[in-house]
Amino acid sequence: MQMDIDTIIVDSHNDTMSRVIDEETWLPVVDIGDSTELHIDIPKMKAGKLEAGFFAAYNSEEKPERALSKTLALINALYWTEESNKDEFSIASTYDEIENSIMDRKIAAIPTIEGAYSITEENYLELIKQYKDLSVKVVGFNWNYSNALGEGANEEYANNQKSSGGLTDLGKRLVKEMDDLGMIVDVSHMNEETFWGVIETSRAPIIASHSGAYSIRPHQRNLKDNQLKAIAKNGGVAAIVLCKTFIKDSEDVSLKDYMDHIDYAVSLIGIDHVAIGSDFDGCDLPLDIKDASELYKIRDELVNRGYREEDINKLLGKNTLRVIKAVEELAETHMEAKDIEIIPDLKMGQAINGRTPLLTSKIEGNIDGNSLRVIVDGVVYRHDYNEDNESVALKINRPLSEKFHVVTFEVANRVGEIKRETRIIYIEDL
């Protein structure tokens, strides 16, 4: 029996991949296909009827190169998880991909970024496209610290220096680029000024992936009434977080207290603009919900509070899916070159030796050789193209300093349609 995508549960934030990787090597070591001590693993997701989850690549590294390496390590861990659990777990980015995963009875894993500290003036245009290639759907500009894109909730940088100014010019350009690419801006963890900058700049719906109602629990991570109303006017969603610190100023926090935030948001901005964003594996939960296996309790409590089935489905998943679809419909459309094949000599998540690797790929088809580009970590490099054997090679001359990197081979056909192949690699001896 096929599943109805309109009735699924979509959780718009977890930090599980941060628990999957080794703290020292950043390589994936915990297979969530098995039962674990984590809030989320595949058995728990099935038990809690959680069919789709936003898996965050979280970091707050101050240096962009280090932040990029950590972000890629966490995205790589998600691909490793998919490879280890092909029959049950599928990376999905677009609405259609999510729908196909659900219909195939697989958990849809949507890659997101929490803390875009890797993005700089020099790399943003190419790096955000590489993130899109890796199926990243949502980008939260900040964790709590400020960065080149705007101010975080703490209104200071990671070095404790105070920040000011809200959304920066770079942040505005990135919002517009993400709109064009069909990627969603996440406003959780932003300070108020940055939030309002995003509202004024974006032409597409946004999401607060894991926040609460400030009027119930005054906390810098929660949203004030005017912010919630602005999200609704924007067509976006506010996903209510299960983190007990943001729910109530008490150790004695229950699911009832969580539901009070949902009730408040629904009464303020309407049923179409509220969702759920657990923060599993990133916070302490209410006393009566231990992990994803008990996520069904939210549906039960909504029933107890008199919500209609149609409205419950909106809160638990349909609203978030609507935003994904709306953002895609507003994006610019680009035809992919179907008459070109790019065959990199790299697999996703491949280990390489040395800090000055030779990166190569076969390029087959009706290509415009002048259009060929090789991009590493958001930077376009000079390369060698051999027309006779249809291959491109890039020798990295300046030693790479960090462990994880992203490589893209791009080429256009003679009518300007583009083909890209992107891989995450890591240096084995770092």
Image (cartoon, rainbow, N blue to C red):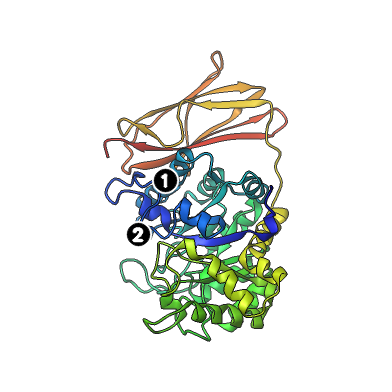
Badge 1 marks a residue whose secondary structure is helix
Rendered residue at 58%/75% (across/down): 301
- The answer to whether one can see residue 170 in this image is no
Q: Which residue is mark 2?
A: 62
Rendered residue at 48%/61% (across/down): 293
Q: Is residue 214 above or below residue 119?
A: below
**Amino acid type assigned to the residue bearing label 1 in the image:** Ala
Location of residue 222 in the rendering, given as x and y in whole percent from the top left corner: 49, 77
Q: How many marks?
A: 2
Q: Which residue is mark 1?
A: 77
Q: Hey, which quadrant is residue 61 in on the image? A: bottom left
Location of residue 210 in the rendering, given as x and y in whole percent from the top left corner: 51, 68
**Amino acid type assigned to the residue bearing label 2 in the image:** Glu
Left or right of 38 on screen, residue 227: right
Q: Hey, which quadrant is residue 156 in on the image? A: bottom left
Q: Nearer the viewer, residue 196 or 33?
A: 33
